[in-house]
Amino acid sequence: MGECNTGMWGIPGLSEPTVNGRHEAGQFNWEQREVSAGVFEFTLQLNDDRSVGKDGNRAAELEFAIDGWSVKNQVMLPGSVYGGNRFQSRRMPYPPIFKAEEDLRKDVPVTVTDIARLNIGQGESRLERDSRDLSTPAIGIYMPDNKVGFWLLLESNLSGGPIGIVITENEDRSKAALSLRIPTGGASSNGETTVQLHAHVFPCTNVTEWIGRFAPIRKSLARQQQLPSVIPFFAAWDILETKYNEMNWAEQENYYSVGLRENHFQDWQCGWVGGGITTYTLLAAGSNKSQERARQTIDFMFRTQAESGLLHGIYSQGQYQGDGFDREDASRWHLVRKSGDVLYFTLKQIALIEQQGESVPDAWKTGVKRLADAFVRLWEQDGQFGQFIDVHTGDIIVGGSTSGAIVPAGLMLAAEYFNNEGYAAAARESARLYVDRDLRAGYTTGGPGEILQCPDSESAFALLESLIVLYEMTGEQEWLASAQEAANLCITWCVSYDFQWPSHAEFGRLGMKTAGTVLANAQNQHSAPGICTLSGDSLLKLFRATGDMLWLELLRDIARTIPQYMSRDDRPIMSWDEPSSRLPAGFVNERVNLSAWEGEDKVGGVFNGSCWSETALMLTIVEVPGLYVQPDTGIFTAIDHIGAERIAEANEGELRLRLWNETSFPAIVHVLSETSQEARKPLGQQQACSLPVIELAAGASIIVQFGSEGFQVI
């Protein structure tokens, strides 16, 4: 980046803004103040009568010019744009799959669909989003040559609508402009709209440091969050388990399908959307019937193992459809993430069954070892796991991406179970690749199978899971440091505020809260209930290792938001399908549409479909405690749908809480109560449903005393 004078807020080259191309007063006023070192509060007052945008709508264009720009600068719009989305692109219909011969190689550069992006080539460079597309209305810029990082936080839920965000670059990329289209009207009685922006500017030497500065400030312009209290976890469990046994059980071939088998995508898919993952939850907390069916499902899953050791990704009506969508050779395509999920979750299930004192079928042990061997062979051959693999030969079809980010976790569990150091070595080496190549570039890619290699949240959370497993199993500090960096990236995908639904929206009728939902990826611009497809207990483990409350709060937000999106007989969710229909009890649809990416009429609504978010909720119930307490430090967090407050009268080293249940369901709350010293010990693959419980009747309130020896109701 060339030499330039320090500009506004200490950002090199940043000019003072114009509004609708004008500096003079009368149409607008702005003022700024430095509220703390490097933090500026910028207040803009707009005259509503005169603020008319170029399209005739009531809006003002606030523009900042930046001289001395560079393509090396990083740009992030959380949940939508990473690294400026400055990747090579392919325009193709949904669902996209690689077609061009030049893309079918191991060293393919990151390749995305036709998403909003800064231009990687010559010509105009323009990126446009609006604040509804983002997990947090914010813009981040990192200037490596100047060693400066910057986050600009925007107000959410403005009465006039979303804020439009446009970033443009000139032909030689030496200049850029950031434009904000701010809606006006209806914000005040005196004909003015007042908008606040917070600018955070700081010295910065690398991408992960810049991303890490976002996590603690992301809620600073959001209104006070009201936690949902709709249905406690284990009341939700009963509905989900009933649904799976009545609707997802494929009687003829004895397996739990991922959907209702209306097409092959809704029949059997291993990993990713739930196949071989939901079984873990049913083995841990299900009835005898559910446990037996879960075992039969895993038996079936290993019958789909190919000669390479990988598992076929899709099965339906006697056919292996493959992950290649409409390609003629689709049946040989396999999304590597799917077999990675199978490796990890099968080993968790083997450990669970052995903890229960039961025997594990030899076919499972043989199958999971063949799978671990396939990954080691792939690693030793190519130094990566790739994205799409030939399921028959185990060779890479399309390389790159972070699709296999869960594999290091699976290999570490395999190393312990089979006492095989080769598995552990591959786990460490592959985790370092993902950290050095992807995480420290500021994005992870290719978790879902139908986005090419767009940045996404699923691969980020999978990498966090692997890094936490490596840390807990080895005690090596390298993995803890990397896990914190991964969590900082993950949090950029998580919605930080409660969206104000339009009057027509189904979710507005139901009072749905959105804080803690998770944006899917840069292509599919919806948020979703839960992480695809993990419980988020890695965040609990990260909190225990670091003491940073940010991660416990994020886990609470993610876990607590999911049950409100489950349809129930007493609280049905109505679909946007014509004619409108109610989602059956137990359905949790993935759509949390803040954005109008599917149309304005789809904001705050869902189609009538069953999906992986049900598995995410079941994992949450099984792996995440409903109440976390550290009596010696006074830390406590209610993650389940109960209330909790401290009562002053308690001895030193003890904590007394009032707990209450506002819902109309009884609550059986699993409690992890431990001292701060105990919190330093790894949790491992512990199930929350094995923890002691506190029972709360509907509407009940109790007082519980916690100490180093446990807890008691008083």
Image (tube, grey):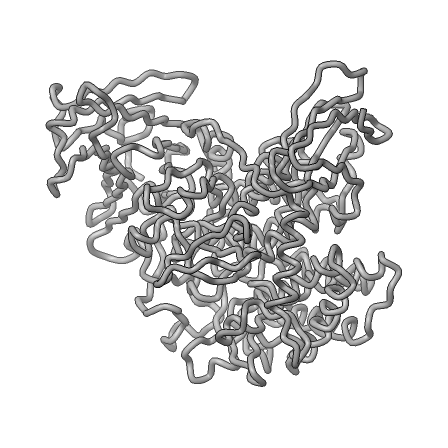
How far across and down, in percent of the image, does residue 211 sit?
47, 39
Q: Position of residue 100 (x, y in %)?
A: 36, 75
Q: Position of residue 256 (x, y in %)?
A: 64, 70
Q: Against 284, is 100 above or below?
A: below
Q: Is residue 323 left or right of residue 667?
A: left
Is residue 76 visible from the viewing direction of this image? no
- In which quadrant is the N terminus drawn? top left
Whether residue 48 is situated above or below residue 438 in the rendered picture? above
Q: Is residue 616 left or right of residue 300?
A: left
The spot of residue 338 in percent (x, y) is 58, 67
Residue 483 visible in rendering = yes
Q: Name the image quarter holding the C terminus.
A: top right
Q: Nearer the viewer, residue 134 or 109?
A: 134
Q: Residue sitting at 79 percent across and 29 percent down?
A: 675
Q: In percent of the image, x 36 and y 52: which residue is there?
A: 85
- Where on the picture, by quarter, is residue 326? bottom left
Q: Nearer the viewer, residue 571 or 207?
A: 571
Q: Quadrant of residue 199?
A: top left
> 7 or 669: which is nearer to us?
669
Total labels: the figure holds 0
Q: Kindly identify the residue that appears in the image at 27 percent across and 41 percent down.
A: 165
Q: Residue furthest front?
A: 570
